[in-house]
Image (cartoon, grey):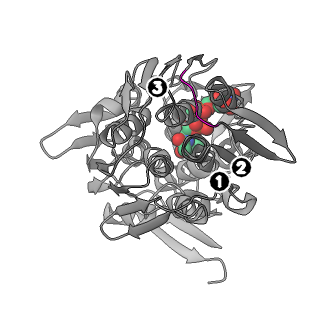
Amino acid sequence: MEKFIVNGGRPLAGTVRIGGSKNAVLPVMAAALLTGEKCVIRGVPRLSDVAAMEDILESLGASVKWDKRAGVITIAADGRLLPEASYELVSRLRASFQITGPLLARTGSVKIPMPGGCAIGTRPVDLHLKGLAALGAEIEQEHGFVRAKARRLEGAKIYLDFPSVGATENIVMAAVLARGQTVLENSAVEPEIVDLANFLNSAGADIRGAGTDTIKVNGVKELRATDHTIIPDRIEAGTFMVAAAVTGGDVTLTNVVCDHLKPVIAKLKEANVSVSETAKGLRVCGAKGGAAVASDIKTLPYPGFPTDMQAQFMALLATARGTSIVTETVFENRFMHVGELKRMGADIKIDSRSAVLEGVGRLMGAQVRATDLRAGAALVLAALGASGATEIDDIYHIDRGYCQLDQKLQSLGADIRRVNDGA
Ligand code: EPZ
């Protein structure tokens, strides 16, 4: 087991390049199952979640070649595909449920384990299944598995009760090869949905309206080979922006889409952090003359404030001047980092879905544990701004979604080391 040792208190400075988006590349990899032709995916970040998806696609019979240095994955699902995924592989990452729509559309049947709950909530898949059923799939759930069957899916009008990112992706992927038109209302509008639609359209799909709350998919007979570059990771970018803010540093981010970061930029500015677009990239300078100021946050589906940035912002607000209220509306249990931040001296009270933070000026290093990906990132940020040394355990969570976070932070002047537990 590896851990991070962070000696805090150094303002970060320099330039950092943001990688491709984890939450865009995973569904795009699943979507490659929709065609027997070669799909080249560029800008792929080196993450353990991408490796887990690679294993799943290979177990289904697809050929996957990942050139890690170049950040390019080539997928060819050209042989007979096994329409069944194993519990061992699927339980490694929830995004693996995104193979359901493509496998069903391509092979006419799929058997996949129900994804369980995780550290941030119960995370049901009822909306995915309702959508696939509306497209004509027969769905059964037994012994912890979902079985779906359909000779050919039929386009349908579907209204999502909640704009779920995963359900929108699964339904759109299934609808691409369905007969006729699918209209998906109250769909998610996240940039990752637009990236998936762009990938599919470049392979011959007919999807309109991605990025709005009504997506129309006109089914096509088949998809063809394509070459697609993944969008930059807006959550990795947001995390580095908070790293600059929390250390009072001066960091420029390259390979970012500022439009995707609007809610994060707005809240950083409200907290007295300077954010500006320069010729080199997006420049973030920590609050002048001391800590940031308090700011209230409510997580919402895009274009609201992202739930995937909530924990990292808490690391900043824990030291800001004044009282902040952070409300989590997307997931029911995404405050696991609070107990760990309190170990570092934060003053946070949770009342149902809200957390009240009294800024304490400075946190203190402590021994803490990453409970999930973003909670882990929040602890790294808290440690960078804290006085003294922090030891962060279970950093495998962080490696799921951040490529070489420690090395990138070191290049900005952070004192962070990765050590083996035994060392
Ligand atoms: C995606 O998860 C992301 N994961 C998450 O990233 C992100 O937090 C989330 O979207 C919200 O932005 C990937 O893209 C791989 P949802 P997803 O379906 O698709 C409820 C990270 O840290 N819901 O939009 O699972 C659900 O329980 C992560 O990178 C149902 O009730 O999110 C939740 O409360 C973790 N029924 C809410 O909707 C369903 O069938 C939003 O979930 C589906 C979802």
Instruction: Work out whether 16 lies above or below 106.
Output: below
Q: Quadrant of the N terminus?
A: bottom right
- Residue 302 in the image: state x and y as whole percent: 46, 25
Q: Is residue 122 left or right of residue 356?
A: right
Asked where in the image residue 409 lies, by quadrant, the reply is bottom left
Q: Quadrant of the C terminus?
A: bottom right
Q: In the rendered image, which residue does mark 2 sit on?
A: 112
Instruction: Work out whether 245 lies above or below 267.
Output: below
Q: Which mark is residue 150?
A: none
Q: Which residues are magenta?
A: 151-155
Ligand 1 sits in which quadrant? top right
Q: Pick whichever of labels 2 and 1 is earlier in the sequence.
A: 1
Distance between mark 3 and mark 2 Cα atoms: 29 Å
- In this rendered view, identify the residue nearer to me: 12 or 162: 162
Q: In the rendered image, which residue does mark 1 sit on?
A: 83
For badge 1, the amino acid type reads: Pro
From where the camera sits, is residue 328 visible?
A: no
For badge 3, the amino acid type reads: Tyr
- In this rendered view, identify the residue nearer to me: 56 or 302: 56
Instruction: Work out whether 244 lies above or below 84.
Output: above
**Mark 3 C-beta closer than 8 Å to ligand 1:** yes
